[in-house]
Each structure stands twice: as structure tokens, then as C-alpha cells.
Image: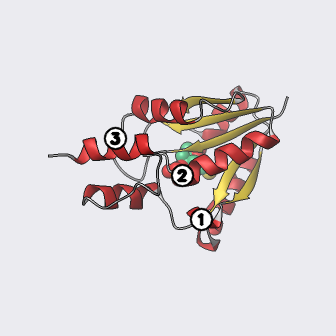
Amino acid sequence: MAIALIPGSFDPVTNGHLDIIERTAVHFDEVIVAVIRNPQKTQALFSLEDRQAMLAELTGHLPNVRIDFFKGLLVDFATEHGVSAIVKGLRAVSDFDYELQMAQMNYQLSKIDTLFMPTSPRWSFLSSSLVREVARFGGDVSKMVPPQVAQRLKEQFAS
Ligand code: PNS
């Protein structure tokens, strides 16, 4: 069975993430979307439980997708779960340098390949951090994230 692993912070999940998850699900028997417990870049806006719950709701129509979480090294989780390939979305050339380095390090550690999937051009400008920033200052993110996520962001930044 071919199992894909899509890791990330998903803080919050965006339309770009969902595009990659849906398209990956076409090519693999099973897709594990693994939410990192403690994102390194920032203090998470949403708790791990909230991020997992939002992803589960938004991928409920995809029977071969399940949501999990990990801490520590991604390749340890991948090996424990019999993952065939790690899948990463690439928005632009600027993503490539760092993603290539991580892919090569992860391969060196585990012999698990990383496959890159080009993000749909519709979403190539999107990142969770920009969505958080726009939402924090009351900007309209309704075309960048699903309605449930837009609502959660509004609630989070209310008051
Ligand atoms: O959504 P993000 O924040 O861009 O996801 C980054 C993530 C979680 C995929 C990356 O930071 C990661 O894999 N972290 C786990 C720690 C690890 O394995 N580090 C070695 C990478 S070569």
C-alpha cells in the first residue's frame, strides 16, 4: 500500500494546503496529514487539537485521508507509519532551496523520498503566516481559507 505523508504546521489550514491534500489523495492509497505539535517558527495561533479538528472536518470527504500529529523528527514518524513518500507543495522557486535541503536530509536519515507537487497558481501567494497577519488586522481572508477557518480566525482575533 502506498502511503503519502503531508507534514506541516497548518496554523491555520489554507486553500493551498487543501489543494495539495486533495491532489495527493488521487495518487496514493492512503494519505496521512501530520500536524507538527510545536511549530518552530512561531508560537502556534491554534492549539494542536484545533488544527487537527479543522483538518479533519475539511478533509472528511476524502476517505483515504487521515489526520495525525507528530513531534520530533518527521522521518521517525514516517518510518513508524510505513510511509512511502513525503509530499510537499512548492509555491515558488523561493520554496525550493529549503525544501530541497530538507528532502535530502530526510532521505539521508531514512531513505524515504520527498515528492514535490506544484501548488495551483491560484494559491501560490498564500501562506499560513500571511493569512494570520491579515486576519489579525481585520483583513478579509475569506477567499484564502475555507469559511470555517475564516470564522475561527475572526473569533480568535475578536476583542
Ligand atoms: O508548515 P510548515 O511549518 O512549513 O512545516 C514545516 C515542517 C513541520 C514540515 C518541518 O519543520 C519539519 O519537518 N519539522 C520536523 C522536524 C524535523 O524533522 N526536522 C528535520 C528536517 S530536515
Residue located 52% across and 31% down the image: 57
Residue located 64% across and 42% down the image: 6
**What amino acid is at disc 1?**
Arg
Give me the disc on residue 152.
3
For mark 1, what is the residue?
122
Q: Establish if 77 lies above or below 142.
A: above
* Drawn side of residue 104 relative to residue 97, left or right: right
SS type, badge 3: helix
For mark 2, what is the residue?
15
**What amino acid is at disc 3?**
Arg
Cα distance in 3D space between marks 1 and 2? 9 Å
Q: Residue 132, image x and y in percent?
A: 35, 55
The residue closer to the viewer here, 39 or 157, is: 157
Residue located 69% across and 62% down the image: 100
Q: Residue 73, image x and y in percent?
A: 58, 39
Q: Do the residues labelled 1 and 2 touch (CB within 8 Å)?
A: yes
User: Residue 26 occupies which quadrant of the picture?
Assistant: top right
**What amino acid is at disc 2?**
Asn
